[in-house]
Image (cartoon, helix red, strand yellow):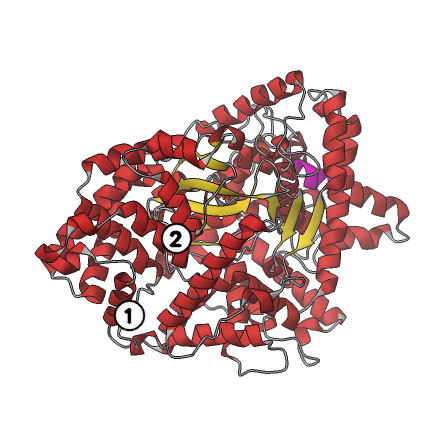
C-alpha cells in the first residue's frame, strides 16, 4: 500500500537508480580572482564547511558585515555563473537562467545519474550523516542510535561475511530453490502462494502479490488490509514493456545473473538462462500494472471485499484466503481492499502459463535480493563501501537518521522562518479563494469548503521527536560483524509490527524514504518539511534577498499546498477523509482547465524524446499554482515592507544582489528557474521521462513561467513570444 500510494514525488526517479553517489559542482579552470572565490563558495564549497557542527570559531556563522557581504557575493556569483545572458529570456528562460549549468555540473563527466539542487542538498545531508555515524558513541547517542551505528558498521564489514552460506540458509527457511537443486528439485512440494505468504509473514517480503496493513485511504480513522501488486525493481509498466527501455531490462538481467553466479555459485550458462527466465516472468507480471502517466482516482482503484469473495474471484488458480491467512497469521473476518484488480487478473493468466520452476526461482530470488548489498567479492576501500553503506542504512533507518541529525544540529530558528513563510502562503491563497477573479471558475460553496480545508492544513517538521524508538527497536540486538543477521532481525520485527497495526488505531501516515523535499499528505491534510531542508546556504539564508527565498523555498512549499487541491488532493476534505466535496460545475471546470495542461506539456520534446499527452497533470498543476502563490506572497510582503519600513532604500538594497543588474522581481524568477537547473546522464534520460511524474526541469521552468503574465511583464516579453503565448493554462 505504501509503495503504491507513495507520493514522495521528488525522490521517485532517483530512488529507481541504485547506488548513485551524487557529486557537487566543481570547476576545471582556476582563476586568481575574487569572483572565482565567490563562485566556488556558492558552488557549495561553503556548504561543505558549514555541515560540520557549528562552533564559536565558525566564521560562516559570525554575524558580521564582512560575513554577510561574503555570503551575498557568493550567492550573486553562483547565480551569474549559471546564466547564459546571450540567450533571450523571452525565447527560452531555462537556457537564459541555466545555460552554463551543464558545463559546470556535467552528470556524464561526474559519472552520476543527475546533478542539481536536490542532489546537492542530499549530498550535504549525507556528509552530516556520515560524520555522525562515524563518530564514536557520545552523550547524544540513545541506545537506538547506537543500534543504527552498529548496523552501519556491520555494512562496512560486509566483505568479511560468507554470503553464499548466509543466503542459502535464508532460502532453506522456506524450501528449496530449483536453480540450486537441479534435477532433484521436487515440483510437487512447491506452493507459490504458501511460500510467498510465509516470506511476507516472517520478513515482510511479498513476491508477486502483497498483503499489507496500512491506514485506510478512504477512512483515515482505521487501519485495513490491502491486497495489491508486489513492488517492482524497475518501478513502472513502461520500463518493462517499452522498446526504448530495453537497455534497462538488459542491465537488470545482467545484475540478476551476476548475483546468481557470484553469491550462489551458479554456473554461468545456467545463471544466464535462469536470469532471462526470471526477468521474462517479471515482465509478464508488470504487464498488469497501471500506466503511471495517466491519472487514476484512488477510490476507483480500491474494492472492498470479504476474504471469501476474493478467494472465489481467483480460485482455482491461486488461493487468496490462504495468502491472507498465512501472511497475517490469523483468520480475517473484516473486509479488506483489493487494489487495482487488473493486476491480480493478469497474475492468474501469467501463473497458468509459467513453469513452477521459474516461479520458484523468482520468489526465492526476491527473498535474497532483499538481503543483498551488491559489492564485489574483492576487498573494497572504506570510502567505496561508505558510498554503498550510507544509502543502504538510510533505506531502513530514515526516521532514526532524521531524528539523530535534528537532535545534534537543532536549528529551530530555521523552522520558525519556514513556518512564518507558510503562514504568508496560506494567507495569500485564502485571499485568492475569497476574492480572486481568476478563481471564479470555482463555485462559492466549493470555495468555502476549500477555505475550510486550507485553514485545517498544517505544516510539520519530520524530526520524529515524538516517535517511540524504544518500542520500534524492541528485541533488536545489532552486532557490528554480521549485517545479514542484523537485517534479518530488523525485517522480522517490522513484519510483526506491520501485522499488529490491524488491531491498533492508525498512526501518522509516513513515507518510506528519507525525504529532501516537502511532501503533501492528503489523508492527514499536512505538509511535512524534511530536516534536510533546514541546511543553510543552499536555497536560503537570512542574508539572501527574500526574492531568492520566495522564488525557491516558498515555491516549494506552495507547490505542496496546491497538491491539496490538485486532481487527487481535491478528493480529500479538511479532515483528510476521501470524499467528493466539489460541486458538479466546479469539478467540470477543473477537468476542462486540466486539459489545457495536458495539451501544453504534451507538446514538449526533451532531448529528442516526445513527452506524453497525459491526464496525470497533478505535478504541473502544483508547479503552476505554486509559482503563482509564491510570487503573490512575495509581492504582498514586498509592498508591506515598502509601506511600513523606515528605510525604503535599505529594503531595496537587500532585495537585490551585488553586481547583478536584475530587479527584485526578476531575481525571483531567475531564482525559481535556477532551482531546476540540472543535468541528467544520457543513459538515464529515457528512464526519467518514463518513471518520473514530474516534467523535466527545463519544462518545469518554461511551462510555468509561460503561463504567468507577471513574468512576461517583468522581462518585457512581447505577445506571442515563446515565453508569452496568448493562450495560458491557469487553475490556481
In this rendering, position of residue 673 left or right of residue 71: left
Q: Which disc number belongs to residue 200?
A: 2
Percent across and percent down for residue 8 are 53, 47
> Dot 2 surroundings within 10 Å: few (below 14), some, or many (20 or more)?
many
In the image, what residue occupies the spot 30% across and 60% down? 368
In this rendering, position of residue 640 left or right of residue 326: right
Percent across and percent down for residue 168 are 24, 66
Residue behind mark 1? 166
Would you place residue 361 above or below residue 333 in this image? below
Q: Is residue 301 magenta?
A: no
Q: Which secondary structure lies at badge 1?
A: helix
| Viewer-closest of 463 and 251 | 463
Image-quadrant location for residue 262: bottom left
In the image, what residue occupies the spot 65% across and 70% down? 407
Label 1 to label 2: alpha-carbon separation? 19 Å
Q: Is residue 632 magenta?
A: yes
Q: What is the quadrant of the C terminus in the image?
A: top right
Q: Which secondary structure lies at badge 2?
A: helix
- Work out whether residue 727 can be spotted: no
In the image, what residue occupies the spot 67% across and 79% down? 55
Q: Which residues are magenta?
A: 628-633
Q: Which disc number belongs to residue 275?
A: none
First in residue order: circle 1 vs circle 2? 1
Amino acid at each position: 500500500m505504501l509503495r503504491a500510494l507513495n507520493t514522495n514525488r521528488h525522490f521517485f526517479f532517483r530512488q529507481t537508480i541504485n547506488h548513485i553517489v551524487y557529486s557537487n559542482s566543481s570547476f576545471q579552470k582556476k582563476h586568481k580572482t575574487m569572483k572565482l572565490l565567490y563562485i566556488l563558495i556558492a558552488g557549495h564549497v561553503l556548504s561543505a564547511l558549514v555541515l560540520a557542527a557549528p562552533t564559536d570559531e565558525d566564521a560562516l556563522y559570525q554575524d558580521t558585515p564582512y560575513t554577510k557581504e561574503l555570503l551575498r557575493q557568493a550567492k550573486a556569483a553562483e547565480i551569474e555563473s549559471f546564466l547564459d545572458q546571450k540567450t533571450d529570456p523571452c525565447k527560452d528562460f531555462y537556457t537564459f537562467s541555466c545555460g552554463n549549468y551543464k558545463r559546470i555540473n556535467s552528470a556524464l563527466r561526474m559519472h552520476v545519474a543527475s546533478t542539481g539542487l536536490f542532489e546537492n542538498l542530499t549530498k550535504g545531508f549525507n556528509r552530516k550523516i556520515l560524520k555522525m555515524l562515524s563518530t564514536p558513541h557520545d552523550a547524544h547517542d540513545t541506545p537506538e542510535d547506537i543500534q543504527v551505528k552498529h548496523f552501519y558498521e556491520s555494512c562496512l564489514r560486509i566483505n568479511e561475511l560468507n554470503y553464499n552460506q548466509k543466503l542459502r540458509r535464508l532460502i532453506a527457511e522456506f524450501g528449496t530453490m530449483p536453480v540450486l537443486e537441479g534435477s532433484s528439485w521436487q515440483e510437487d512440494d512447491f506452493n507459490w502462494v504458501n511460500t510467498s505468504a510465509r516470506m511476507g509473514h516472517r520478513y515482510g517480503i511479498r513476491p508477486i502479490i502483497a498483503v499489507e496493513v496500512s491506514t485506510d485511504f478512504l477512512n483515515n480513522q482505521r487501519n485495513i488490509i490491502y491486497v495489491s501488486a508486489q513492488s517492482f525493481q524497475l518501478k513502472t509498466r513502461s520500463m518493462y514493456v517499452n522498446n526504448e527501455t530495453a537497455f534497462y531490462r538488459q542491465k537488470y538481467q545482467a545484475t540478476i545473473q551476476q548475483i546468481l553466479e557470484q553469491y550462489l555459485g551458479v554456473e554461468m550458462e545456467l545463471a544466464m538462462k535462469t536470469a532471462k527466465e526470471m526477468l521474462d516472468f517479471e515482465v509478464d507480471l508488470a504487464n498488469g500494472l497501471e500506466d503511471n502517466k495517466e491519472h487514476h482516482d484512488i477510490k476507483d482503484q480500491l474494492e472492498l471485499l470479504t476474504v471469501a469473495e476474493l478467494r472465489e474471484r481467483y480460485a482455482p488458480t491461486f488461493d487468496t484466503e490462504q495468502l491472507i491467512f498465512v501472511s497475517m497469521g490469523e483468520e480475517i473476518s473484516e473486509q479488506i481492499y483489493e487494489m487495482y484488480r487488473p493486476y491480480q487478473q493478469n497474475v492468474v493468466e501469467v501463473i497458468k502459463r509459467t513453469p513452477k520452476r521459474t516461479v520458484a526461482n523468482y520468489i526465492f530470488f526476491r527473498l535474497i535480493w532483499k538481503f543483498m548489498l551488491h559489492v564485489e567479492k574483492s576487498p573494497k576501500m572504506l570510502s567505496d563501501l561508505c558510498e554503498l553503506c550510507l544509502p543502504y542504512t538510510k533505506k531502513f533507518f530514515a526516521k532514526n537518521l532524521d531524528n539523530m541529525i535534528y537532535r545534534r544540529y537543532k536549528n529551530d530558528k530555521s523552522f520558525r522562518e519556514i513556518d512564518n513563510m507558510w503562514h504568508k502562503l496560506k494567507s495569500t491563497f485564502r485571499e485568492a479563494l475569497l476574492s480572486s477573479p481568476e478563481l471564479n471558475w470555482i463555485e462559492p460553496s466549493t470555495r468555502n469548503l476549500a477555505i475550510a480545508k486550507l485553514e485545517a492544513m498544517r505544516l510539520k517538521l519530520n524530526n520524529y521527536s515524538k516517535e517511540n524508538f524504544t518500542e520500534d527497536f524492541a528485541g533488536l540486538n545489532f552486532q557490528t560483524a554480521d549485517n545479514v543477521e542484523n537485517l534479518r532481525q530488523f525485517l522480522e520485527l517490522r513484519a510483526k509490527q506491520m501485522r499488529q497495526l490491524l488491531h491498533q488505531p492508525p498512526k501518522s501516515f509516513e513515507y518510506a524514504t528519507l525525504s529532501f523535499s516537502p511532501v503533501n499528505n492528503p489523508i492527514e491534510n499536512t505538509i511535512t518539511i524534511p530536516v534536510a531542508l533546514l541546511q543553510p546556504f543552499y536555497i536560503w539564508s537570512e542574508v539572501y534577498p527574500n526574492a531568492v527565498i520566495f522564488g525557491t523555498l516558498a515555491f516549494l512549499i506552495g507547490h505542496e499546498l496546491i497538491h491539496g487541491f490538485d486532481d487527487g488532493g481535491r478528493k480529500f476534505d479538511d479532515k483528510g477523509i476521501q470524499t467528493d466535496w466539489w460541486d458538479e460545475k466546479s469539478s467540470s471546470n477543473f477537468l476542462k482547465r486540466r486539459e489545457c495542461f495536458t495539451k501544453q506539456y504534451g507538446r514538449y520534446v526533451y532531448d529528442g524524446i516526445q513527452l506524453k499527452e497525459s491526464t496525470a497533470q497533478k505535478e504541473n498543476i502544483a508547479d503552476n499554482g505554486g509559482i503563482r502563490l509564491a510570487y503573490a506572497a512575495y509581492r504582498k510582503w514586498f509592498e508591506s515592507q515598502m509601506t511600513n519600513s523606515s528605510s525604503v532604500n535599505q529594503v531595496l538594497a537587500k532585495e537585490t544582489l551585488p553586481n547583478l543588474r536584475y530587479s527584485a522581481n526578476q531575481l525571483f524568477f531567475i531564482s525559481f528557474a535556477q532551482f531546476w537547473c540540472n543535468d541528467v546522464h544520457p543513459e538515464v534520460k529515457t528512464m526519467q521521462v518514463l518513471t518520473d511524474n514530474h516534467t523535466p526541469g527545463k519544462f518545469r521552468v518554461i511551462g510555468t513561467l509561460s503561463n504567468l503574465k507577471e513574468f512576461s511583464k517583468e522581462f518585457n516579453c512581447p505577445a506571442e513570444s515563446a515565453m508569452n503565448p496568448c493562450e495560458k493554462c491557469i487553475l490556481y
